[in-house]
Image (cartoon, rainbow, N blue to C red):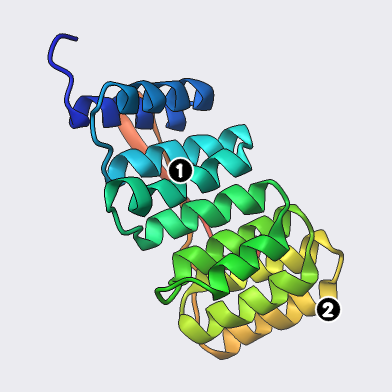
């Protein structure tokens, strides 16, 4: 490509990052900076995601800090969520929780949900429950929180707590959006739906 600009760099970095080529995304990011092309918010989302998938915690945190320090870019909620993902995937749940509660902007549901998802993977009930309760206060009508909290209890074998969460969801009138899937057979589209009774 003869005329590289930030759009083409971002497309390549994000593309590599989203398709399991985190190391290549990071190499491109370093090359971009070396050539004097200024990264923007989109660039940083791509490279932070790459760090998360490759497990480069310290490098990811350095990149996050360089946004404002080196380029005057104020991180947005998506960047904070990316850092939580970096820490959470690596199992640093205490650090992730501390990061969230000390954010200079109010964490949104995406940030908390990222932390809760990491708690499910690492089976951390203490931080997971606190995160789930904060999410329920923030968005009491969002079914995703109830489902994630139910999943946390399920992976820990706490079936009573799982059932209580599902009952709370029902009592509050919260409905889970059914899962959908489509297939095409002989030029006809067929849709399949999965209801609330199959939460897992």
Seen at 57% across and 81% down, the residue is 134
Left or right? Give the position of 30 relative to 39.
right
Please report contact status of discs 1 and 2: CB closer than 8 Å, yes or no: no
Name the residue carrying label 1: 63
Q: How far across and how far down the image is residue 16, in percent?
A: 42, 25
Task: State the residue at coordinates (60%, 62%).
Answer: 115
Can residue 54 be seen at all in this image of the molecule? yes
Which quarter of the rendered picture does the N terminus lie within?
top left
Q: Residues within 10 Å of mark 1 (few under 14, many from 20)?
A: some
**Which picture quadrant has residue 147?**
bottom right
Quarter holding the C terminus is bottom right
Q: Is residue 22 above or below residue 141?
A: above
Residue at left offset 28%, top offset 38%:
39
Q: Residue furthest front?
A: 69
Q: Is residue 20 visible?
A: no
Closer-to-camera residue (47/125):
47
Count residues near mark 2 (Cα–Cα under 10 Å), then give few for <14, some for 14-19, many for 20+: few
Q: Does 17 sit left or right of 6 as displayed? A: right
Q: Secondary structure at mark 1?
A: helix
| Residue located farthest toward the bottom when viewing the structure as drawn | 171
Q: For residue 157, which numbered disc appears in the image?
A: none
Local secondary structure at mark 2? helix
Residue most toward the right? 157
Q: Is residue 152 above or below residue 63?
A: below
Mark 2 highlights which residue? 160
Labels 1 and 2: the sequence-earlier one: 1
């Amino acid at each position: 490509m003869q005329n590289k600009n930030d759009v083409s760099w971002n497309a390549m970095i994000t593309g590599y990052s989203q398709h399991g080529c985190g190391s290549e995304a990071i190499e491109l990011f370093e090359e971009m900076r070396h050539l004097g092309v200024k990264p923007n918010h989109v660039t940083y989302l791509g490279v932070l995601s790459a760090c998360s998938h490759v497990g480069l915690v310290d490098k990811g945190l350095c990149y996050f800090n360089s946004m404002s320090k080196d380029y005057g870019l104020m991180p947005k909620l998506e960047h904070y969520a990316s850092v939580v993902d970096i820490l959470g995937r690596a199992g640093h749940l205490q650090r992730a929780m501390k990061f969230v509660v000390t954010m200079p902007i109010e964490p949104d549901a995406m940030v908390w949900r990222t932390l809760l998802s990491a708690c499910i993977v690492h089976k951390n009930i203490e931080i997971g429950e606190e995160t789930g309760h904060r999410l329920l206060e923030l968005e009491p009508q969002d079914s995703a929180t109830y489902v994630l909290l139910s999943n946390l209890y399920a992976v820990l074998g706490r079936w009573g707590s799982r059932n209580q969460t599902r009952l709370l969801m029902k009592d509050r009138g919260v409905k889970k959006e059914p899962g959908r899937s489509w297939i095409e057979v002989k030029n006809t589209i067929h849709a399949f739906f999965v209801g609330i009774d199959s939460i897992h």
